[in-house]
Image (spheres, rainbow, N blue to C red):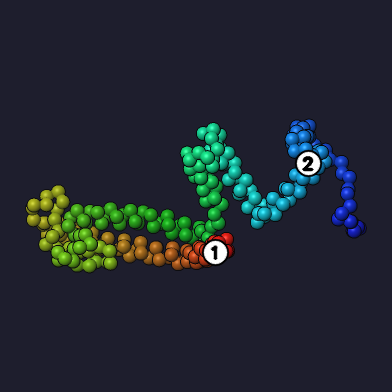
Amino acid sequence: MEKTDRDPNKIIALQVRMKETLRSQIEGHAQASGNSMNAEIIERLSASFEFRERFAGRAALNLFVEMASQIRRAESMTGKPCFEDPETYFAARHLVDDVWNRSRPKPTNFDEITDLQVKLGPLMESRRALENFLEDCGVLGPGNALLSGGVRDDGRLYLMNQSNWRNPTAPDEPLSAEDREILKVKVQERQKLADETAALEAKIAKLLKPWSDAKARGEVIYRQLCNQMER
């Protein structure tokens, strides 16, 4: 197609087709603002371009439009303005937070992290259940167990002396040799679960390292922008 140089200051006549409802809206706003329909159309077109240029692309514009629609939802529910009524404000804030969180980017290895977290969940539950059982049996003690003869186990829990071990259903009766061996096996099972969960947590932390670094850099940028605003 042959290119033509156009004078940017030249007034061009265009024939525009639109529905009557839109034409009526433009006419009403033009009369209210004291503009001609032509001036109203030009003003609104110019404003739309300026409005879009304030945002970092269409995705950001769509995000804020969705946030605005959620604010309107809250106001429709309460019948009160968002920025005047506390109840409406907090409802709208939660709705806007939901929109923002849905737009949050995902790590490039998101699926791998998710798979590891899915595996970690049941292991953590099993570990907690076993630790609760061992605490009931007097095998694992509280953080001050060292003061009462406990032995440090893995940096978080304490393995009590075997003289403190008991049957939770019959705490006053001596613990049988068979029960004592069962508890020893349970201690080993707990340690195995601790090692497995620690290994999975280390893998997840390693995969999330770039994400954590990006978050830290984002915090730095945020503080820099705040400092610029204060100047």
Quarter that holds the C terminus: bottom right
Q: Earlier in the sequence, mark 1 or mark 2?
A: 2
Question: Is any part of residue 77 visible from this angle?
Answer: no
At x 65% / y 56%, what residue is drawn?
Answer: 56
Which kind of residue does numbered mark 1 sit on?
Asn
Quarter that holds the N terminus: bottom right
Which kind of residue does numbered mark 2 sit on?
Glu
Q: Mark 1 and mark 2: span between their CA atoms?
A: 40 Å
Where in the figure is residue 134, as x and y percent of width and height? 21, 56
Q: Nearer the viewer, residue 167 or 149?
A: 149
Q: Are marks 1 and 2 in contact (CB under 8 Å)?
A: no
Where in the figure is residue 160, as x and y percent of width and height? 17, 63
Query: Quick check: 137 left or right of 86?
Result: left
The number of numbered discs placed on residues in the rendered structure image is 2
Q: Nearer the viewer, residue 188 or 153?
A: 153
Q: Secondary structure at mark 1?
A: helix
Q: What residue sits right under mark 2 in the picture? A: 40
Where in the figure is residue 210, as x and y percent of width and height? 51, 66
How busy is the neighbourhood of tag 2: few (under 14 within 10 Å), some, or many (20 plus)?
some
At x 59% / y 41%, what residue is drawn?
Answer: 69
In the displayed structure, 36 sits above or below 146; it is above
At x 34% / y 56%, what residue is drawn?
Answer: 124
Q: Which mark is residue 227?
A: 1
How busy is the neighbourhood of tag 1: few (under 14 within 10 Å), some, or many (20 plus)?
few
Query: Quick check: 115 left or right of 131?
Result: right
Q: Nearer the viewer, residue 58 or 156?
A: 58
Query: Quick check: 9 left or right of 67?
Result: right
